[in-house]
Image (tube, grey):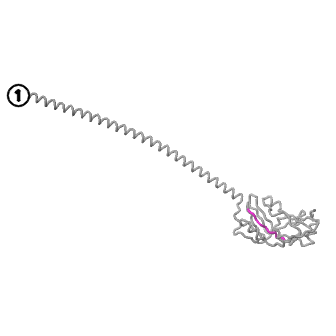
Amino acid sequence: MAFLGTTSLTKKLKAHNIIIPFVEERIKNGSYELSLGAQVFQTDSSPRGVKYLKPNEKIEIKPGQFALLLTKEYVKIPEDKIAFISIKAGIKFKGLVNVSGFHVDPGFEGNLLFSVYNAGPANIVLSNDTPYFPMWFADLDAPQDYNGDHDKQTKIPDEPVQMLSQGELTSPNVLSKRIDEVRSLRSKFEMLALLVIAFLSALTVKVWTDASKLKEAVEFGYKKKAEEISSDSTYNKLQSNVSVLSNKIDSLTNFTKKASTAKTKK
């Protein structure tokens, strides 16, 4: 299998309606550079759906997002040729990756659809009618019949649009930002936890200190009360003894009086 060089490719493309519209200046280094057409679909578009670009209108593919890009050119691949497609290096170096395949079947006819993904760190800007997609041709040893589902394709099919519209696609940058937010929130929770622990520790120390002081006060009060009770008991006992002694003195006095009276009578 041999690839067609610039001279052979120019003759082939000029002699047959292989690329419509055909611009000879787009033939470079053995390839023909296809351009971005008017139909695009982006996974971060709102509302999601196929967008129709005006002449020279630009689109931005954000990091982590997919896009479906339809070429402006309508191609007719000869049955004895196979085509290979890519994205120009200047765009690939920015992070745009072709995820839809790298060849066009012999006998295919229609606008080519590129499914791309921005794996880079920044938005990638593309413009309508600007050449981004080189295509090379190689000879086959025998003609082939194309029997694919996308023959005579002129618009972005519904199926890939529906598949890429399911759910939300989050870019690495957005995920990184969310991770940073979670880390920040975690740090705040950790700081709050430390403050709570410090507060509880201080509160525990205060309660323990207050409890110790309360215990000392109770013990002091108990001691004082015990002393008072002891003093009252001693006083009551002394008073009782005094009362007993007073009674005895009274009894002795009465006895003496009685004895004196009896003696006088005699």
Rendering quarter of residue 173 = bottom right
- For the point 80% across and 58% down, the residue is 93
| Residue that appears at 84% across and 63% down | 102
Q: Which residues are magenta?
A: 65-73
Report the quarter where the N terminus lies: bottom right
Seen in the image, is 181 located left or right of residue 110? left
For the stretch drawn in magenta, the main secondary structure is: strand
Q: Quadrant of residue 53?
A: bottom right
> Residue 218 sits in which quadrant?
top left
Q: Position of residue 129 (x, y in %)?
A: 81, 69
- What's the amino acid at mark 1? Lys
Frontmost residue, 65 versus 130: 65
Horizontal relation, residue 167 to residue 246: left or right: right
Give the SS element for disc 1. helix
Q: Residue at x 52, y 45 (%)?
A: 201
Q: Work out which residue is located at the far left of the displayed protein and give it.
A: 266
Residue where numbered disc 1 is placed:
265
Residue 104 pos. (x, y %): 86, 66
Seen from the viewer's position, the closer of residues 243 and 204 is 243
Q: In front: 26, or 169?
A: 169
Q: Is residue 170 above or below residue 202?
A: below
In the rendered image, which quarter contains the C terminus? top left
Give yes or no for residue 68 being in the magenta stretch.
Answer: yes
User: Residue 31: image x %, image y %?
Assistant: 88, 64
Of residues 146 and 129, the one drawn nearer to the viewer in this rendering: 146
